[in-house]
Image (cartoon, helix red, strand yellow):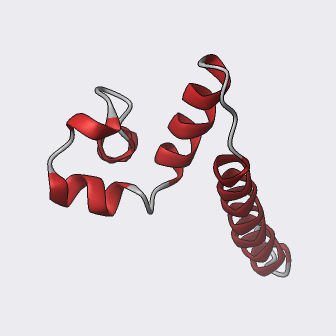
Amino acid sequence: MYLPLAYLGGLFQGAADLPSAVERWGSWVPTRSWNDAVQDAAFGSPRLVSWLALGGWTVGFFVVAWLGFRRDEGRNYR
């Protein structure tokens, strides 16, 4: 699952070098947000949008994990 996310996020090559269809869908994956945040920090031009997107993905994944935990916690395994 990570390999397609890495390609869509532009981790193998720059996001500008991706085909237009991949670049369009790539902006909706968490690896693109991570790539943008790291590149911005490395090249000295941090943007708040990248960090807000990462925060949104973090909160979203936390909610999904918490709901799964709550659902699983009510079951009795023997």
* Left or right, 3 with reference to 54: left
Residue 63 location, x and y as percent? 77, 71
Count of residue discs:
0
The residue at the point 65 percent across, 57 percent down is 53
Q: Quadrant of the C terminus?
A: bottom right
* Left or right, 58 with reference to 43: right
The residue at the point 27 percent across, 53 percent down is 23
* Left or right, 36 with reference to 25: right
The residue at the point 77 percent across, 77 percent down is 67
The residue at the point 77 percent across, 64 percent down is 59
Residue 4 location, x and y as percent? 29, 46
Displayed quadrant of residue 62: bottom right
Task: Say if 13 sits above or below 25 in the image.
Answer: above
Task: Say if 42 sits above or below 59 in the image.
Answer: above
Q: Nearer the viewer, residue 9 or 37?
A: 37
Residue 3 location, x and y as percent? 32, 38
Residue 65 location, x and y as percent? 73, 65
